[in-house]
Amino acid sequence: MRRIIIDTDPGKDDAVAILLALAAPEELELVSVTTVAGNVPLSRTTANALALLELGGRPGVPVFPGCARPMIRPPVTAEHVHGETGLQGLVLPDAQAPAQRQHAVDHLIEVLLREPAGSITLCLLGPATNFAMALVKAPEIAPRIGEVVWMAGARSEGGNVSPAAEYNVYADPEAAAVLLDSGVLLTMLPLDLTHQVLMTRDRLLALRKVGTAAARAVAVMFGDADGNPQREREKDGIPLHDPCVIAHLLDPELFKGRRINVAVETASPISLGMSVADWFHVTGRPQNALWLNEADADRFFNLLFTRLARLP
Ligand code: BDR
Ligand code: CA
């Protein structure tokens, strides 16, 4: 059983990731959810996380609100992708359970210092602000974390928020730099991978047959009333970025990649937030991340739909 903390900015693909984690109680113990400003402001990401835990039948999982803005820069939100509420089109009742009073950064430090070294995996689904701030405040947590698995970065097709940068890196590049330089065991799932994991019309129609409230919620966020998936740029469907993090933990054979060095651009206005992935080991810099870039998409959707069928 892997013990995980999900750090997230829901976000409709974050929502699917949370539901997928809730649907895997035999493999994953969800210790807590920490929220961060990202796709929408912190008050929304926190309210969304609480509401999603209730939808998934697990209102007892504690939610710790974290940083309301990036380390240095002003917030960059993404309502054009996720809708004003962050859960585009999905209306959930306000959660009964309140958020925790402790700040997410302090919660991360407390858990990592309290639990056995190596026993916690951090699933990072948004800008890396909370964990980077925890590393700044308490650097002694770095050797105590088991693994960080982060949906972030882009190499082969360029970025989705600028020609150079993927959103989670771009939104807080200094936090990304702290994480990449921290020496923690890090797995990255970049756009190179998640752009192969597309919610197409056929998959949306199959999802609509699953029949649970959780499956219906995902279908609402990713398709229109006629069953057409929204298209993202030239893609034939809409990428399910963040659930890939959870799917990777459940089935390590789903995705393949290579250990490389990844650095982040924090100065240039043109390429701010670019994840500079040294795929051919040309820099001689040490490997600091497993960069996953090949996906078995059919196997992913089979896993996702099977698991959504187990939720309320
Ligand atoms: C990432 O950016 C966010 O908009 C998504 O939730 C995902 O975490 C994809 O670039
Ligand atoms: Ca996200």
Image (spheres, helix red, strand yellow):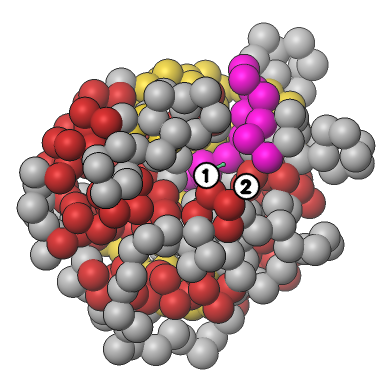
Residue 168 - label: 2
Hey, what amino acid is under mark 2? Asn
Q: Point out the image quarter for the C terminus.
A: bottom left
Picture coordinates of residue 16, whole percent (x, y): 33, 52
Spot occupied by residue 254 in the image (x, y as percentages of width and height): 30, 26
Quarter of the figure with residue 153: top right
Task: Establish if 299 lies above or below 136.
Answer: above
Label 1 packing within 10 angstroms: few (<14), some (14-19), many (20+) = many
Which residue, given by chain and number where applicable, does mark 1 sit on? Answer: 150
Q: Nearer the viewer, residue 275 or 297?
A: 297
The magenta span reads: 145-161
Amino acid beneath label 1: Trp
Frontmost residue, 204 versus 263: 204
Q: Is 39 positioned to the left or the right of 149 in the image?
A: right
Instruction: Answer whether labels 2 and 1 touch (C-beta < 8 Å).
Output: yes
Residue 155 appears in the rendering: yes
Whether disc 2's CB lies below 8 Å from ligand 1 is answered: yes
Residue 304's place in the image compared with 82, above or below, is above
